[in-house]
Image (cartoon, helix red, strand yellow):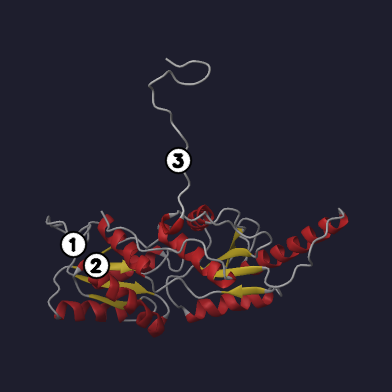
Amino acid sequence: MSSPNGPASGLPVRMPRPRQTGRHRRPEPAVAPEGAPALVLAVPGTPSAAVRGLAEEVISIARSELPGLDARIGYLDGADDEFPALDTILSRTAAERVARYEQARAAGREVAEPTGATAVVVPLLAGPDVATERRIRQAVMDSTTAAELTEVLGPHPLLAEGLHVRLSEAGLSRADRARLFTVATAADGIILATVGGDEAVQAAGITGMLLAARLAVPVMAAALDVDGSVSAIAEQLRGSGAAHLALAPYLIGPEVSAELLAGAAEEADCAAAEPLGAYPAVGKLVLSKYTTALGITPQQPSQGAPVG
């Protein structure tokens, strides 16, 4: 029984855990620097409620990794308040930054005049797409805003992990190679479907090798926007002995229509997994592009645990 002065004699006293020091000490969670440029997610494709939900989830993941992050969404094909265009968001971000500076001066606070980039633009693209990236770059120029444009998210081992997860969710692959049970619908050949022509196919091939190592089956990339590319790769895989193919979209999702993906799966005569979507690693890679551009180093995204 406890007394007003503490626990009764003989009972253990709970003391606060001492703070770890040295190399085993846990790093303090990073926060966004005050006055840091905004992260603007450049979302391709036709805007819709589903696309907005996906983009907001990606942004939410990035904010959870870096508290205080000013993150916004600009749509490459946006044109109104519901789906604001990328150049509109960039111009608005710059105007708000100037307004905050003027308000601080009017209140008598000593603040540095805003200089440098107002925003860091991160394309919501798994791999290179010259045409889309050119449009994003033009939108940045049209905004007349000092903004930095990063590279696309891939290739990266985390995207290979995400592709594996989506295939597993669709019943097209085992959750991991260590498990001995088989999946009746498991594919023995994967078509990695991307957009952006030959350059995108070459870049996707890097992620494809990582995915092949995870699945222990052949993986070959094909371009959804090149006529005959998907069917040619399907034929090549079957010619090498693959009997059950699967289509793995190397896409976040907004880049192409669901009809195009369905048509590609029909062309290859195989089942298809879902696009990467708001897989957690996508949000982490978006943040990694932002922090790398600014030279700040929160905890870097690391390869996750085996799927399962």
Residue at which label 3 appears? 17
Vertical side of 199 occupied by 171: above or below: above
Q: CA distance from mark 3 to mark 2?
A: 40 Å
Q: CA distance from mark 2 to mark 1?
A: 7 Å
Residue at which label 1 appears? 177
Left or right, 217 with reference to 23 = left
Query: How far from the left and from the top, in percent, is residue 30?
Result: 55, 57
The residue drawn where x is 35% and y is 77% is 204
CB atoms at circles 2 and 1 under 8 Å apart?
yes
Left or right, 11 with reference to 69 = left
Q: Quadrant of residue 195?
A: bottom left
- For marks 3 and 2, give the one nearer the viewer: 3
Q: Residues within 10 Å of mark 2 (few under 14, many from 20)?
A: some
Q: Quadrant of residue 73?
A: bottom right
Q: Residues within 10 Å of mark 3 (few under 14, many from 20)?
A: few
Instruction: Identify which amino acid the numbered label 2 is placed on.
Output: Arg
Q: Quadrant of residue 294?
A: bottom right
